[in-house]
Amino acid sequence: MNAVYDIRDLTVDLYTRSAAVRVVDGVSLSVAAGECLAIVGESGSGKTVMSFAPIGLMPEGVSVGLSGGAQLAGADLIGGDEAALARLRGREVAVIFQDPMTALNPARRIGSQIAEVCTLHLGLKGAAAEARALELMRLVGISDPEARLRQYPHELSGGLCQRVVIAMAIAAEPKLLIADEPTTALDVTVQAQILDLLRDLRARMGMAMILITHDIGVVANAADRVAVMYAGRLAEVGPVDQVLRAPTHPYTRALIDAIPRPEDPVGSPFRGLPGMPPQLAGPIGGCAFAPRCPRATPGCATLRPPMRAVAGTPGWQAACHHLTLAVIPKGAAA
Amino acid sequence: MTTPVLEVRNLVTHFRSVERGKTIKAVDGVSLHLNAGEIVGLIGESGCGKSTLSRSIVGLATPNSGQIVLDGTDLSTLRGSALRRTRSAIQYVFQDPYSSLNNRQTIGEALEEALVIAGLPAERRGARTTELLDHVGLPAAIAPRYGRELSGGQRQRVAIARALAMNPRVLIADEPVSALDLSVRAQVMNLFFDLSRNLGVACLLVAHDLALVRQAASRNYVMYLGKIVEEGASTQLYGDPRHPYSRALLASAPSPDPVAERARPRVPLTGELPSPTNPPSGCRFRTRCPVAQAACTATLPPPVEVATGHRAACLFEGA
Amino acid sequence: MTVFLNSARPLRVSPGLALWIVAGFLFLGLFGPWLVPHDPLKQNLLAAGQGPGLVHWLGTDHLGRDTFSRLIAAANTSLVGITLVLGIALIIGIGLGTLAGYRRGWTEEAIMRVTDVGLAMPSLIIALAMIGIFGTGYWNMVIALALAWWPSFCRVSRAVVVGVMNKPHIEALRVMGASPLRIFFVHLLPTTTGSVLVYATADAGGLALSIATLSFLGLGIQPPTPEWGQMLVDSLPYLEGDPRQVILPGLALTLVVVAFNFLGEAIALNRVPRPLGRRLLARRRAEAAAWDRPPRGLVTGEKA
């Protein structure tokens, strides 16, 4: 498989005034061209940091320690200089955020904002940049693009703004698109349209995509594979059909079980998980999920479970001592 | 038939638009009612007016006309402190648990203040604070801590405890769990069941997560561009939606099962939500409706009773 | 403007130094009257115009008054002046600004239009006009400056309140039926006061300068009360013969004004997260590195 983006045993530490915390702990993942990998996890699970730290996108004033490997289209991301990373951003890897309104400059016309990106990444000037802007507007399915180019962000709906943001992101035909909750701020009726657009663009441009979300419905709709994170570690990774329909890790199982189902009787209590996720600190000795896990045994608290292949499906792995299926140890995390 | 705790009659709330001379018709003639101990869902897309409606009921937005009747008292007849005292029986739970608590106050101070406002004598406040925290499943030891030290789920429960300090008859929750993680949503949602069943509080659950509302609410209102287009019991509405908008809305909800999700028929709603400054004439949904006809332009369809308690405002209801 | 800021960058005073200067000013301002080695008002024409010495550390002025004592006493004059003006201006500004942001509607319109007029004119011009109308005198100066200074506090307070009023925690109070007085005094005023005080720190320097300017012009603090601006104008005729008499009060004033400005800026910038210092970063790195070492490696002992 030709991985466009490949991270190996990635560990991210954040250094704050009060402590050092490990937010991502030995995660290995890869995304192939044209593939969509969804990363699912709750707040504090490290899914955002894991996706953005290797490409050098962290909030200002945060000190980060990265170890492990991260390669984008064959180029090493970790240990390289900041300027090289900055050149990569926008050209090789592009990002879409949750709220399209904050991603756009409210005081400038849509057209000039898209054209500016074309100038920046493609070196196009004047009329050529505007022509490319128009082409991109058509590509992301905006009707009447000539008129829209002259409008301001506040004149467009949230769905249209997200299309504009997508147009800006794909301007340089990046190899990887990282979409952080791209549909959370949108209505369900618009959500499906945006996901369809992203799928279409991916197929057309052979672009790999990382979709960060907490919405399992979005994963089911848009992703080929899904990685479930808990407390900075990978709990389970595999094709969506397997992981979402027959989860093997107790955390994945509990997460999917917590979604209300159409067959639940009206007025019946909601299912959830007991307890709370662990506080961010140093690496956890055993399995991070053990304190909340219904299947935990004393050994779980002391020994960290490695990622093991779930038999029968290539690429399906879970980190649990109690995988009931036959397991073939593979690539144990250090 | 029981008299409802809260009755909203023909409520209209308009805003001045940023564009000169235009008005945003956020809520345009809405009537609904809540019975004691009942959880009622209010669903619709953002911009449909559901937030403005709930804010108008609690007094955070000023309605232009219409009545809000609480336990038989029309709130528009009251003024000043009498209005504040009476209306405090309707409480509100905000979407964002991170900004609904004052960062300068501890949990105990926030609840204490609510009890002061509720007029509870000083000597009973301490015990009542513990009782309130216990009600929402939090230990009393949490009282001296600041809101920022708590998780989102805990904060939301504190916000609910604070609302309970007012001994509410009605609780309006605007997207109470959408900012929370999936695994802790259940704790908060089950709390609403507890409040409605054990304290007889009527809850209006405003949300966009249809599966969540279906399971929690016994009755529902569907809102589109400032109007109620359909109402009915959960079994009726989710099993047999009659208004074309309700159908489109339900059909667009994604399924967490990838196989079912792929098989789900795509019912793309054409076009965008029209501007509430200039809503379409006649039926407001006609510009995006798959079954719209010429007649829809002329008349605003009245709600038609299709089954007991199930009403849809469509000329071709059932078509 | 940018050019100016860029060229000014190398001059940036560390917030620590600014804090020490301001602390020194406050200390001398508060306890100056008890610290002075000589009576700052006592003239001794026999000792006029002396240079620094053992008796008079910084020498004496043309009337033989001890310069060191006068400089310290002037700090007291300045501090009392600043405190009075800021006190009055803050009460008016925060009160009206908070009210405008809370009430909105015509109350806000009326208050903010007056504020706009006040902000449109340089504060010193307003103060001069006031003094022109009411005449010179200590209290006239204080009131004139306060009336010139409140509009900026009013504007800041209103902006803070308008921002806070839409926050769910204030809306929750309204839903609970909290009285407007409770919301105003218990929740809004403390919030605005906090924000405005930061702003006022930077303004204190400008105010010290204005008091000195008015006194220099003979419209503020009247002789013989020691005051830096007044000391400047007093010793101006002797500039060529004894420049020390002009330089010292000028230097004192400049230090205080600059220190207040840098402190105000430092407080404002403090809200922006900054990267860790080199030493703290190294410590955190060592902490994190210890996690990855096999347990036995811990024997080497990490400095905590």
Image: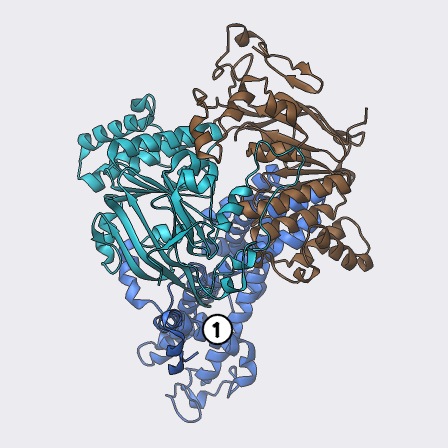
The quadrant of the picture occupied by the C terminus of chain B is top right
Amino acid type at mark 1: Glu
Give the residue at x 37% y 78%: C297
Residue C192 at least partly seen: yes
Image coords of residue C70 (percent x, y): 48, 80
- The chain drawn in cyan is A
The residue sitting at the front extreme is A326
Give the residue at x 29% y 23%: A146
Q: In this view, does A87 lie to the left or right of A242?
A: left
Image coords of residue A82 (percent x, y): 25, 57
Host chain of mark 1: C
Give the residue at x 41% y 37%: A241
Q: In this view, does C109 lie above or below B6?
A: below
Residue B180 at least partly seen: no
Image coords of residue A331 (percent x, y): 32, 57
Instruction: Describe the colour scheme in one phrase.
Output: by chain
From the viewer's side, name the closer residue of B84 and A249.
Answer: A249
The residue sitting at the top extreme is B294
Q: Name the quadrant containing residue C254.
A: bottom left
Q: In this view, does B2 lie to the left or right of C265?
A: right
Question: Badge 1 is on which residue?
Answer: C227
Give the residue at x 64% y 49%: B157
Q: Is residue C42 left or right of residue A208?
A: right
- The chain drawn in brown is B
Image coords of residue A119 (percent x, y): 21, 38
The quadrant of the picture occupied by the N terminus of chain B is top right
Structural crowding at the residue carrying mark 1, measured as other residues with C-alpha within 10 Å and reported as few (<14), some (14–19) or many (≥20): many
Could you tell me which secondary element the residue under label 1 belongs to?
loop
Q: Name the quadrant containing residue A19.
A: bottom left
Question: Chain C takes which shade in the image?
Answer: blue
